[in-house]
Amino acid sequence: MLRALYTEHGGPLLGYVLRLTGGDRQHAEDIVQETLLRAWRHPEALTGRPVRPWLFTVARNLVVDAHRARMARPPEVGDEGLAVVAGSDDIDRALESWTVAEAMADLSPQHRAVIIETYYRGNSVAEAADVLGIPAGTVKSRTYYALRALKLALEERGLAP
């Protein structure tokens, strides 16, 4: 039955669907195949009526449904858009800075204050000691232990080696 339908109606149906799809042969062939598959699944629809108008109506409905489905989705941008996002150093830097900020938040307030004064503000040990109101030796030891704690916190987040 299916072979006879294709032999008799396949050519005109493909020509009709090609016009509906704007000449997209692959899409048109898919529509014809789906149309004939629906005819095979529903042989009762073909009895007692002319077959070709039914096939053309099913094909037209499939083309309209496919067009509506494409319009409902956001447009595809291709690989160029992904290359821009994947190659962006700004995103990597932002993610790293968030991770470092989270790791800094895990430090004790004393360790965090020492790292902020010595690394972020660029103060020397003596300047950091003056700002924090603690001896220079305490700044040195807190910096040592703060860096160890920060390294551990970053390793837990998968950022440090």
Image (cartoon, rainbow, N blue to C red):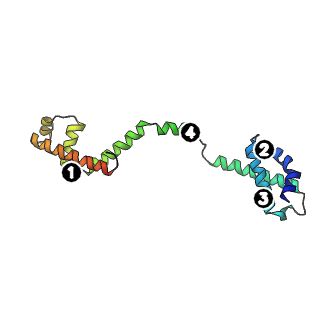
Badge 3 marks a residue whose secondary structure is helix
Work out whether mark 1 precedes mark 4 in sequence or the reverse, and give the earlier one.
4
Q: How far apart are marks 3 and 2 (CA)?
A: 19 Å
Residue shown at 22% from the left, 41% from the top = 116
Q: Which of the two discs, 3 and 1, sits closer to the camera?
A: 3
Work out whether mark 2 precedes mark 1 in sequence or the reverse, and give the earlier one.
2
Q: Which of the two discs, 3 and 2, sits closer to the camera?
A: 3
Q: Residues within 10 Å of mark 1 (few under 14, many from 20)?
A: few
Amino acid residing under circle 4: Asp
Q: In the shown orientation, is residue 21 left or right of residue 119?
A: right
Task: Kindly identify which residue carries mark 1.
Answer: 108
Q: In the shown orientation, is residue 26 left or right of residue 98?
A: right
Residue shown at 87% from the left, 52% from the top = 7
Task: Kindly identify which residue carries mark 3.
Answer: 38
Q: Distance between the residues labelled 4 and 2?
A: 29 Å
Work out whether mark 4 precedes mark 2 in sequence or the reverse, and give the earlier one.
2
Work out whether mark 3 precedes mark 2 in sequence or the reverse, and give the earlier one.
2
Q: How crowded is mark 4: few (under 14 residues within 10 Å), some or many (20 or more)?
A: few
Amino acid residing under circle 1: Ser
Q: How far apart are marks 3 and 1 (CA)?
A: 69 Å
Q: In the shown orientation, is residue 10 left or right of residue 135?
A: right
- Residue 43 bears which disc, if any? none
Task: Kindly identify which residue carries mark 4.
Answer: 79
Residue shown at 78% from the left, 50% from the top = 32
Task: Kindly identify which residue carries mark 2.
Answer: 20
Which quadrant is home to the N terminus?
bottom right
Amino acid residing under circle 2: Leu
Badge 4 marks a residue whose secondary structure is helix
Badge 1 marks a residue whose secondary structure is loop
Work out whether mark 3 precedes mark 1 in sequence or the reverse, and give the earlier one.
3
Amino acid residing under circle 3: Arg
Q: Distance between the residues labelled 4 and 3?
A: 35 Å
